[in-house]
Amino acid sequence: MALADTPVPAALRTKRRRETARTLAFLSPWLIGFGVFFAYPLVSTVYFSFMKYDGFTAPTFNGLKNWDYVLNHYPSFWTGLGNTLWLVLVMVTLRVAFGLGIGLLITKVRSGVGFFRTAFYLPYLAPPVAATMAFAFLLNPGTGPVNHLLGELGLPQPGWFTDPSWSKPALTMLAMWGVGDLMVIFMAALLDVPKEQYEAAELDGAGPWQRFRYVTFPNISPIVMFAVVTGVIQTMQYYTQAIVAGKVASGVIGGSGQQFEPGYPHGSTWTLPQMVYNLGFQRFDTGSACVVAVILFAISMAFTSLLLRRKSGFINED
Amino acid sequence: MTLTSAVRLPVRASSAAAKVARRRAALHWVAVHSLAIAAALFFLLPFVFVLLTSVMSDRQALTADLWPTEWHWGNYAKVWQTPGFLSWWRNTLLYAGAGTLLTVVSSVPVAYALAKFRFRGRNLALMAVIAMMMLPPQVTVIPMYLFWAKQLHLTGSLWPLIIPMAFGDAFSIFLLRQFLLTIPKEYLEAARIDGCGDLRTLLRVVLPMAKPAIAAVALFQFFYCWNDYFGPQIYSSENAGAWTLSYGLESFKGAHHTNWNLTMAATLLVTAPVLVLFFFAQKAFIEGVTLTGVKG
Amino acid sequence: MDTTRRTHRALAALTGTACLALLATACTGTNSGGGQDGSAAGQDVTITFWHGWSQDNEVKAIADNVAAFEKLHPNIHVKVVGNIADDKSEQALRAGGDEAPDVVSSFTTDNVGKFCSAGVWADLKPMLQKDGIDPAKTFPAAMLQYSQFQGNQCSLPLLGDAYGLYYNKTAFAAAGITAPPKTFGEFEADAVKLTQADGDGYKQLGFMPNYHGYESTPSHFLGQYGPGYFAADGTSDIATDPKVAAMYTWQKGLVDKLGGFDKLEKYRTGFGDEFSAKNPFTTGQVAMSIDGEWRTASLAEDKPEFEWATAPFPVPDDQAASYGRGYQTGTIVGIARTSKKQTASWELVKYLTTDTDAVVSFANAIHNVPSTFAALDSPKLDADANFRTFIDIAKNPHSNTTPASINGGAYQVSMQNLGYEFESGRQSDLKAGLAATAKEIDAAVQQAK
């Protein structure tokens, strides 16, 4: 009756209900995905971090024992956290700087732009496992071409993936080799910088460095920010290259009395994500693996919240 | 920029100043191109060395020689005949193909809704998409593995890798949304006036305009699946019949007792399709990468 | 529209999935096994057998063995899958899917403790009893010991491995050495004599002592000392057992004598794959190596350009009387507790591990040490002198193995890590290193309990 008395709001309500249904229908695949592949496993990871569970016998409550084990007794935890943070600091910084440099270079090139752009971009496409194996070969201290060439030039020949103080730099080099994605992003951003600003700066007598400092950089800083934050997030998940480099360089097959040493050499390539795999799928200590996963989640989300800050320019409104 | 200004200067300058400017421009040109060549060597030489080693004899591959004394192209045939190599290919193609298709089909409507519908909680949903995008897969892998293994008994197959793609991929959704934001409202309103429903608007009006973004998303997803190592290692590796190229390649050196020459040949065989695809779809790809960094 | 309908159908199917997921935490219960099948009554049964062998001759040998079994049991069919690593088979067994194997074998006895204590592999004792097999009278004591954990016989030995010395006779003659070394003192002298420098590398190295030098691992060297690894109360005793410290010190001394860690490490990275014709011993890059008996088969096949022979690995000078011992281990085979075809699976395991002809022919084919008394004494066993060395090592009462631990080989990883630190000089205080490593091992065992 009330409906009949107020026909306009009723139509509106129907429309609104229809719109809600429509929105839900469009979002439905992702809503399910969010529940099943994000929310549920997150809650479950936290739950398992307090349980003793070997993936076989029923889980039992374990209190804070897993946390205590990982933080105080699992010797490679702090090594792995340290390595991950090293990579976040050094690898991300160098990769972004190098990507920007290559991006700048390509905008200055006048002849053969197409060739250079393709050449600079190509390594980014090499599948990580393949690229890592190729680098393990290239940088092999005994037989690899890199040390061979360094030797010819009379330069020192580091042990690269077999030397704990060189393995992370070698991984960093591998990351810089695949800098193509950043190069393209920076190239596009650099070409978008208004020409008039350069001209104005030049009239004011600005040199190349000043032009970069006061014109180029302010214009592309959101892109730099984007590159840094996504770089950090990717590096938090750094897994494949580290594990493959360690396995291939160590040459260990594994057998009785000959266990594979994770993070070869000397734990220097050991990262948080590898720890989840080692604890969860090799030691079958689900609880401790989930402790590491929760820690990894906390750190990643801290970085993500940086990205979600409005002024980062990552989310734009229509 | 320096170059153009150097060229423009001479109009009013004396001829001596013009000469200096020309010389500076030439020097600049040489400097830039030498740097570019050095960089190109850094990026391309690894491919060259890998190719050269892949055709060496077993014995030579264990020396520091750079140039093969004999060219053993048969190494490629040997790799090709490795037991399982063909099934790794088939599995990888299946994973990448089905994964890409499902991702596109499931992500487009979500991205459209996030970009063009007004509803309560839209910002929250967007934040959730970004959070998912940023989540390291290792965080959720333990419960996910138990879910696929204990509830659905699907581990040791490609299903745990493919099925989740039917539920929208956060990165693809985000990318598509960024692009769809740039489509002017007027087009959608015009379609509505013509009597199109939302779905028809999406299919008839939006999809054709979003083709480049969809192509980019599809390519990214294809590469993601092709390169994925962690997923196959967790979910499918316990059944040798479900190995993918990335996983098989890693086990290749250890398990089949091969030397660097065969390993490098295998490496190139796994990389080749990606490079070929790139040359065919270069434009879409570069546009896609640019899109990820575009701030609208 | 078509798409809407599809979305709806998918929605329905996937809501189900979602609900399942939310329930998942609640029902990750114990997998109960013990399924019997009809193979005893003559029904056709197909079982899956996973193993880790991958070399051509090994794969062929196991196929022959299985074919002989199928001939004896025409109603049991065996699906053989090779080249499976331990982690993967364990992962599959714990997951318990349809593809999971019924019969599993593993190269590393290190994992027996994990398999038995978690109940991933079934206890074979009832089946042995039912068939009237007395394990103590069938299998050598050391092998029986490494295939069980705290009284649970969850696996049986399927051929054994023993570690000894391989030496290049041609290089020995050239260096004027007449007999293989018997003590570490002689060994060190010979290794130095056999080493020929080549610039900052080697033309030939006497022995590769670095712990990444393939089989040169702490556990294998410790086989010459015979430590117990764990005290009676189950805690690690490596910090107090003088044998352990002695081994680390001996190896470090050898590393320094032969050119130092860095130089050796660089040489090592030029080695070919361990399990290939490019093994550094086969290529002549090293003149002596510690290796398992299987190398006799690959050397016979690869035909290196020099004469070679085998002997027991030398022993510490103060334990000279124990010469003839070595590190001992073996392949083990067991049955998945979740298998629904345990009757047929047991038939296969019984055949593989106790049938004398099967054990002997398999041992001959892949040159492993046989794992039953009957097979060790069988006249059909290969009489090759180089191979006999290892049979004698296996029979030697001083031979030593790494004991099963509840968390598998984790304690050996810890000991290896200490080895890497000590050999490279990053850790110079061995005593402190051993104490810290013992603590780390205890914490890991505690966590796994």
Image (tube, grey):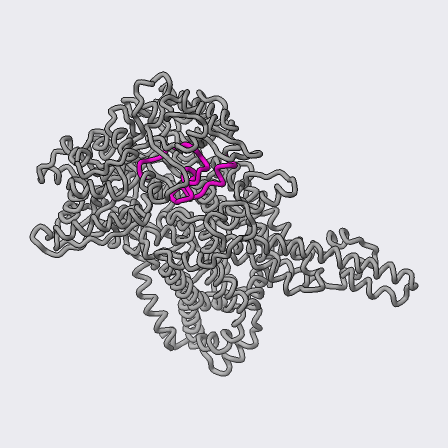
Q: Residue at left 22%, top 34%?
A: C148
Residue C271, magenta (yes or no):
yes
Residue B121: x and y, percent? 47, 60
Most extreme residue toward the bottom is: B194
Most extreme residue toward the left is: C41
Camera-nearest residue between A199 and C246: C246
Q: Quadrant of the C terminus of chain C?
A: top left
Decide: is B149 above or below B204: above
Residue A44, magenta (yes or no):
no
Q: Quadrant of residue A157?
A: top right
Camera-nearest residue between A48 and B156: B156
Question: Is residue B176 in sight in this rendering?
Answer: no
Question: Is residue B70 in sight in this rendering?
Answer: yes
Q: Which residues are magenta?
A: C265-294
Q: Residue at left 74%, top 55%?
A: B31
Residue B159: x and y, percent? 34, 59
Q: In screen coordinates, is B71 left or right of B101?
A: right
Decide: is B148 above or below A156: below
Count of labels in the image = 0
Camera-nearest residue between A217 and B41: B41
Residue C218: x and y, percent? 39, 29
Most extreme residue toward the top is: C318
Residue C171: x and y, percent? 43, 32
Q: Quadrant of the N terminus of chain C?
A: bottom left
Camera-nearest residue between B191 and C349: C349
